[in-house]
Image (cartoon, helix red, strand yellow):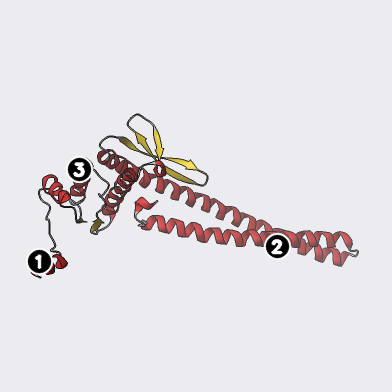
Amino acid sequence: MAAELGLERPAESALRLWALMSARVEEDQDRRVRELFTAYSKASDELDAVDGDNAVAALEEQRRTVLLEIEDKAFSYFRLRAGIVAAEQALRLYRDKHRSSMMLRASAAFQVISRGAYRGLATQPDKDTEVLIGIGADGSSKLAQEMSKRTRFQLYLALRVAGYHEFAQSRPPVPVIADDIMETFDDFRAEEAFRLFADMANVGQVIYLTHHQHLCDIARRVCPNARIHELAAPLAQERRAA
């Protein structure tokens, strides 16, 4: 999910790598079992087709050897398959646990930014994946792609806020840089966004870039501890000097 900011936890990486490697070994084991079964079938056919005690005894020994190897490989295959299923289940539970935590954060942030127009977020299955939906104050649902551009920007910000808090829980926080992402926000939603930024600033650094003066005024009012740096425009200064 984009909300996770492309940051994967080490435990999840290890589980995914183990499952991937095990799947490759499973493919090799499966191929070897099929080869052995073919050899066993061939030995059985040859045994039925020959005469003579010595030849029969030799082929019978060959068939037993192949049968024992098939049995051994089959047990190895099932043990490996059980391990893969366990790893996949652990990975699924791990993702669900952290996704649930992040979804709760994102839902709360989205409710704040939307000023209650949406009461939260949820997911619904779509073929082999899941899609994100917003839950309206009246209980209605709407897919992210069906939302207006302004609402989608609020949703993306809520996901980013939630992802940052999840990241900061297990790693040293990195600065967050946002470049004029509130261009589509009205003043009320901009206020709520700055409050969320102020909360993020309690665990890390938030840098917001804008050329809209009214957003600076809102930031001063909502985040009294924020430092606002106004950068002079060199071109404008040159024109005034001329």
CB within 8 Å, label 1 to label 3: no
* Foreground: disc 2 or disc 1: 1
Circle 2 residues within 10 Å: few <14, some 14–19, many ≥20: few
Q: How far apart are marks 3 and 2 (CA)?
A: 70 Å
Question: Which is nearer the eye, 88 or 73?
Answer: 88
Question: Which is nearer the eye, 235 or 92?
Answer: 235
Residue 82 is marked as: none
Left or right of 102 in this view: 193: left
**Residue at the image point whose x is 29% and y is 53% from the top:** 167
Residue 35 is marked as: 2
Circle 3 residues within 10 Å: few <14, some 14–19, many ≥20: few
Kindly identify which residue carries mark 1. Answer: 240
Circle 1 SS class: helix
Circle 1 residues within 10 Å: few <14, some 14–19, many ≥20: few
Kindly identify which residue carries mark 3. Answer: 187
- Most extreme residue toward the front is 242
